[in-house]
Image (tube, rainbow, N blue to C red):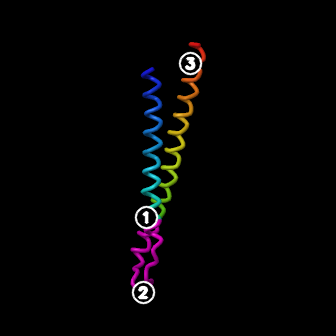
Amino acid sequence: MDISGNILRSGVDAFQAGKRRADMAAADIAAAAVPVDPKVQESNSFADSNRDLVTSLVELEAGKLQAQAGAKVVETADEVLGTLVDMRA
C-alpha cells in the first residue's frame, strides 16, 4: 500500500515541521524575556521588541496547529488502513 505510506509520511512530515516551527518560536519568546535595562532601551526598540514577541506568539500557535493537523492526518491514515485490512480479511 504505497498510497497509505505516502499519507502517513505526509502526516509525520507535517507534525515534525509544526514541532520545529513551535520550537523556534518558543526559543524566540524565551530570548525576548531577557530583561533589558530601561535606561538604555529606546522607545523604538521597545515597539520592535513587542512586535517580535507578538510575531513569535503567532508562530507558536501556527506551529501547534500544524503539528495537530499532521497528527490528525496520521490518525486518519491509520484508521483507513485498519478498515482496508479488515475488508481484506
Tell me where residue 86 appears, x and y as whole percent: 60, 17
Residue 52 disc label: 1
| Residue at horizontal 42 percent and vertical 22 percent from the top | 2
Q: Distance between the residues labelled 1 and 2?
A: 21 Å
Quadrant housing the C terminus? top right
Q: Give the range drawn in magenta.
A: 30-50
Q: Where is residue 78 in the image (x, y as percent from the top left)?
A: 55, 29
Q: Considering depth in this image, is 72 or 39 the residue closer to the camera?
A: 72
User: Residue visible at 52% across and 52% down?
Assistant: 61
Task: Using the image, determine if residue 13 lies above or below residue 1.
Answer: below
Q: Which residue is drawn at 59% across and 14% down?
A: 87
For this orientation, the residue located farthest to the bottom is 39
Element type where label 1 sits in the image: helix
Classify mark 2: helix, strand or loop: loop
Please state which amino acid type lies under the numbered disc 3: Val
Which is more N-terminal, label 1 or label 3?
1
Q: Name the residue under label 2.
A: 39
Amino acid type for the residue under numbered disc 1: Asp
Compared to residue 57, the image places residue 42 above or below, namely below
